Image (spheres, rainbow, N blue to C red):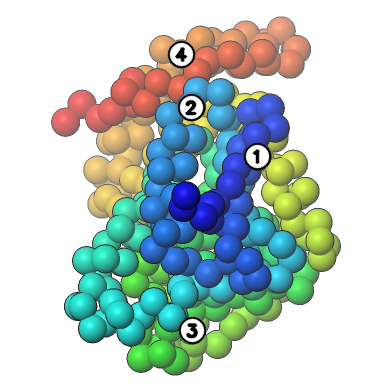
Amino acid sequence: MQDKKVRVEIDGAVATLFLSNPPMNVVTLSLTRQMHDVLHSLAADPAIGALVLTGEGDRAFCAGSDIKEFPRLVAERGIVSQKLGYENETYGLVGNFPKPTVAAIERLALGGGLELAAGCDLIVASEDARLGLPEVKLGGFPGSGGTVRVTRRIGLGRANEMMLLGDMVDAPTALAWGLINRIAPKGQTLAVARGLAARLAEGPAPAAYACKTALRYAMDLPEQDAIRRTLDLSEALSQTHDFAEGVSAFIEKRPAQFSDSLDVDAFKPAD
């Protein structure tokens, strides 16, 4: 039986996906395959309102790829065909997850680990965390989406510094740069991330999805195209029960009771 490299805990509407490859939770081909399948399953589960992504133990969220797999992959010319192609597809499932996502980084997030975390909507890191993209020191570069997702978070100048020098940054620097959203006390990162996820899961699922989609448009499309697409989102959102409930609750000065499940097809662009 294949060793389990990921595991899931579900608490109410919050799912927590653990990278479970101690001690450093490095990314292997097996871990990527298992994570791919689990993410597909969680994305399709209407009971899941938010996802937390973290690493097993207290030594690392994920210290990057298992370098021991590289000699064989290089010899077989399989770095892209056997590893990075599927890895990018899997990390894309995080980046395009239909519900809000939160990464909980305890201690280290390096290389592919940081590239994976960067796909989440929010990132919480421990006060002693160190984050980096050190691939250049191996003669490589971040090949699993980091050149895009990290750059979008922190801008070109700071991304140049992280990727060309390959040095790690500490949690306060990462917060100041916008690479992470919150700093948590050592050992409390997962609890803080789960608290955020619980708040997100209680919110209106269609509105959260519309926010996530609109932000992707803002990063991917020319300004006028992005704005036009947001109007389509607004039209779809205005037809939901949650929107009517939110408006009524505001007028009546009471807490809103959101209940809509997410129908992704309702938000597909007309063209």
Q: Is residue 19 left or right of residue 240?
A: right
Mark found first going from the N terminus, 1 or 4:
1
Q: Are marks 3 and 4 in contact (CB under 8 Å)?
A: no
Q: At label 3, which amino acid type do we have? A: Pro
SS at badge 2: loop
Mark found first going from the N terminus, 1 or 2:
1
Q: At label 2, which amino acid type do we have? A: Asp
**12 to 84, vertically: above or below:** above
Instruction: Give the x, y percent position of residue 184.
Output: 78, 60
Q: Which mark is residue 247?
A: none
Marks 3 and 2: which is nearer the front? 2
Question: Of all residues shown, which one is farthest toward the front?
Answer: 1
**200 to 174, vertically: above or below:** above
Residue designated by label 2: 45
SS at badge 3: loop
The foreground one among 34 and 258 is 34
Residue designated by label 4: 240
Q: What is the CA distance from the residue labelled 1 to the residue labelled 4?
A: 30 Å
Q: At label 1, which amino acid type do we have? A: Glu
Q: Is residue 44 left or right of residue 174?
A: left
The foreground one among 3 and 129 is 3
Q: At label 4, which amino acid type do we have? A: Thr
